Image (cartoon, rainbow, N blue to C red):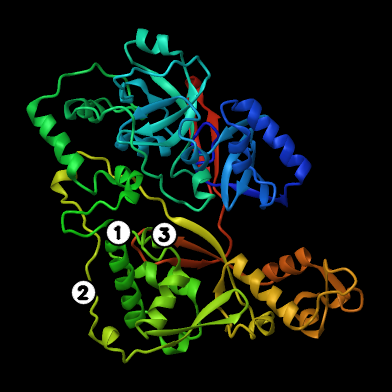
Amino acid sequence: MCQTLGVTSELYVAPALFQYLLSNRRKLKADISTAFPMLSAEQISKLIPNKEDLNVVKVYTHKGDSVTLYVLHENPIFFEVEKKLYPTVYTLWLFPDLLPVFTTWPAVLQKLAGGADLMLPGVVVPPSGLPGVKQGCLCAVTVVRNKAPVGIGTATMSTAEMLGAGMKGKGLSVFHTYMDQLWAFGDKSSPPTIAPSDPEPAESEEHSEESDGGGGGEEEEEKEPSPSTETASKTLQTTPHCAEPEEKAGEGSEEAEEDGRTLQEQMDELLLQCFLHALKTKVKKSDLPLLTSTFLRNHMFSCCPSGKQLDIKKSSYKKLSKFLKCMQQQRKLIQVKELSKGVESIIEVDWKHREICSFSASEGPVLEEAPVESCRDAEKPYQPPEISTLYSVSTRLLPLFQDAQLKKGAVLTAAEVRTIITNYVKNNELVDEINKNYVTINPILCDSLLDKQEYQEIEKLKWDDLFNRCLTRMQHCHQLLFPGQEPIIRKGHIEPIDITVASRGSNKKGNGASI
């Protein structure tokens, strides 16, 4: 989400995550039908199926506003703010004609995802004209050459007022885009490629986007492009690095790059390069068995060349488990085993294999990077680090993790801790026979999770209480992952940042931040 809802920095997910009952589904379908009457009953049933898990998630923006998400197949499909429903980009990709559409340029998408509104100078007027909308009407945003929406917002004025203003000023107040935090709550898939019905704009028109902006800059008078600026515009259009958002919008088209390889093929080769690099220079025999998630997070990502980003979903494998299975069965490089249910680990590496022995860090084809000269005038978007909370196995809880062959100090995510503890309880048959919401406390759980005064008082714990006690008694850590850099893991909680605005003399406002 962008700044209107204030979810650019982070989402806080409340504990209340529950499956939607059938009666609630009927009400939700009725609300969707009322809000979007153009959807047929069959289309609504496709969005809200009766026999599939539908979850409702309550999140809070950093402003404290409450937002309700409706999640299907791990993707948020609608979100509700102040009792009003809005579709997400995942839904709009299924029904691209659901909302009136305003088209802009690929470079503007980065500004919209950063929190800017859509300015009218950045709107591309198709030959058929702008859609007829009223002030406050919900609209979708697309980029040229692709009909798949990449954002939604409300019109700040009617179509007649936009034209009367000479296409100057703010056009849409944008509050959700592709690549924002709401999109990241889902599977982070890229927009599909949907051919637009209107013909593509001329290159001279495309230059007006580069000069006028459209993602929140100041209004400027339109100027005729000079030959030099028109040439620069063409250079930016043909440079893969500068046109990154456009490539994402059309990556499913499998178009070949200049070297004859598709983006998917390049990502496959980069994935193999990082894999071999990590095995040869990062992983030691003493690290085994090594969780596959830890191998990817702490070793493969750190071996990605600077300026490039490893994304398994853009490869032909799509999942880490599928890639590692190929490395095991076809190349015979590693052995992967599920030491506990749902948790895979690398248990053996053939360091004498020819591919590992012959690999050097400088070898292996990587994704093409555009020349710096052709991108001097283009804005390179800042990519913030991914910050995640981790937990380290402590001495007290070590007996609970021995079945997973983990050592003291092993770093895990909360989901991995939950899986390992669940497997421990089930393997030791500790689920209460009468009420399966409770877990019977055995001597190891007693020593690991209970205080001395509780030894004689507590015989059973609820599942949630069990998991919370485990996480509380583990060493808290957090990880900073910058694109193309080695992950930084630090002990302790993530320190909050408080920002205050205070009035000073002469009615001026000053900002202050404290950690």
In terms of sequence position, does the residue under pointer 2 or pointer 1 come before the other?
Answer: 1
Location of residue 512 in the rendering, given as x and y in whole percent from the top left corner: 50, 39
Question: Going 69% across and 75% down the picture, which residue do you hit?
Answer: 421
Q: Is residue 441 left or right of residue 224?
A: right
Q: Secondary structure at mark 1?
A: loop
Q: Amino acid at mark 3?
A: Lys
Distance from disc 2 to disc 1, alpha carbons, whole Å, reads: 15 Å
Disc 3 residue crowd, few under 14, some 14–19, many 20+, Cα 10 Å = some
**Residue 343 versus residue 445: which sits nearer the camera?**
343
Disc 2 residue crowd, few under 14, some 14–19, many 20+, Cα 10 Å = few
Question: Going 78% across and 65% down the picture, which residue do you hit?
Answer: 465
Q: Is residue 253 visible?
A: yes
The picture quadrant where one finds residue 130 is: top left
Residue at the disc numbered 3: 313
Tell whether label 3 touches label 1 (CB within 8 Å): no
Residue farthest toward the top in the current orientation of the protein: 164
Q: Amino acid at mark 2?
A: Glu
Location of residue 278 in the rendering, given as x and y in whole percent from the top left corner: 35, 77
Distance from disc 2 to disc 3, alpha carbons, whole Å, reads: 23 Å
Distance from disc 1 to disc 3, alpha carbons, whole Å, reads: 15 Å
Residue at the disc numbered 2: 363
Q: Secondary structure at mark 2?
A: loop
Q: Is residue 62 visible?
A: no
Disc 1 residue crowd, few under 14, some 14–19, many 20+, Cα 10 Å = some
Vertical position of residue 98 compared to residue 68: above or below: above
Q: Secondary structure at mark 3?
A: helix
Residue farthest toward the left in the current orientation of the protein: 227
Location of residue 301 in the rendering, given as x and y in whole percent from the top left corner: 38, 67
Q: Is residue 473 left or right of residue 98?
A: right
Residue farthest toward the front in the current orientation of the protein: 42
**Residue 24 versus residue 83: which sits nearer the camera?**
24
Give residue 308's mark.
1
